Image (cartoon, coloured by chain):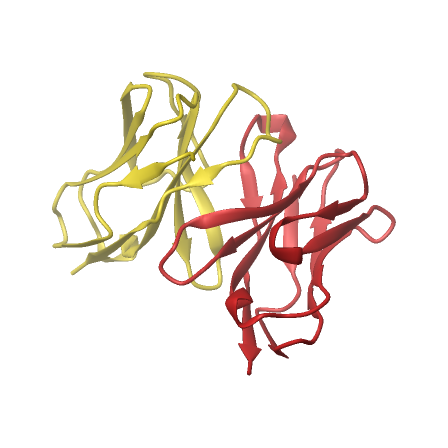
Amino acid sequence: AQSVTQLDSHVSVSEGTPVLLRCNYSSSYSPSLFWYVQHPNKGLQLLLKYTSAATLVKGINGFEAEFKKSETSFHLTKPSAHMSDAAEYFCVVSKKSSGDKLTFGTGTRLAVRP
Amino acid sequence: DVKVTQSSRYLVKRTGEKVFLECVQDMDHENMFWYRQDPGLGLRLIYFSYDVKMKEKGDIPEGYSVSREKKERFSLILESASTNQTSMYLCASNRQGRSSTDTQYFGPGTRLTVL
């Protein structure tokens, strides 16, 4: 079985400071991993995805994530937070053994203080 | 741009009513999905479909059914709505038959309240 754990339900940062959203996964296969973002009253949007190519993945809006197999982690980072980054973020792992099904984490709500 | 649309943003129904949630995608995607989103639980897969008239149960199918008569349209049906089905429902689609690396594109969601 595959699963993903988002270690923080809420994160608050000041504008201009770094962002770190933590995610650990459990998988019996080489996983595909994703980060999605959900802004208030909007649908989910893909930020980035890891599919066994480069371990450092760059996404949209300055976000990136590093796949660390030894730590079973896929943390999301951004050097400098903007007010527009305030949203809910989901770490997601694929269930390759079942085709296209995804398993979502419980989400991390990011607040950005002026 | 890929567009996934859902028929209603907000819906209020009474216990025991039959409820239809409609989803349409305009990118000729083979795969379509229905999720529900609840605070603290993330998204959970209800049903998905790889092709027209094809469906498979997700992680929480109880109390739900689906219909896919046309490639672009995937309907979620609550045969007899109950209060524990009050939730945000999200539809998604992606291309190809069996690749989990293909990005899923999501609709804006339908917030359903069952009284």
- Quadrant hosting residue B14: bottom left
Picture layout, residue B18 above or below residue B53: below
- Is A67 in front, or is A72? A67
Image check: B57 left or right of B66?
right
Quadrant in which the C terminus of chain A appears: bottom right
At 34% across and 16% down in the image, what residue appears?
B52
- Is A18 in front, or is B56? A18
Residue B7 x, y percent position in the rendering:
22, 41
Residue A39 x, y percent position in the rendering:
45, 60
Chain shown red: that is A
Image check: B8 left or right of B108?
left
At 35% across and 48% down in the image, what residue appears?
B108
Number of numbered markers? 0
Residue B37 x, y percent position in the rendering:
41, 53
Chain shown yellow: that is B
Image check: B63 left or right of A2?
left
Give the residue furthest to the right.
A70
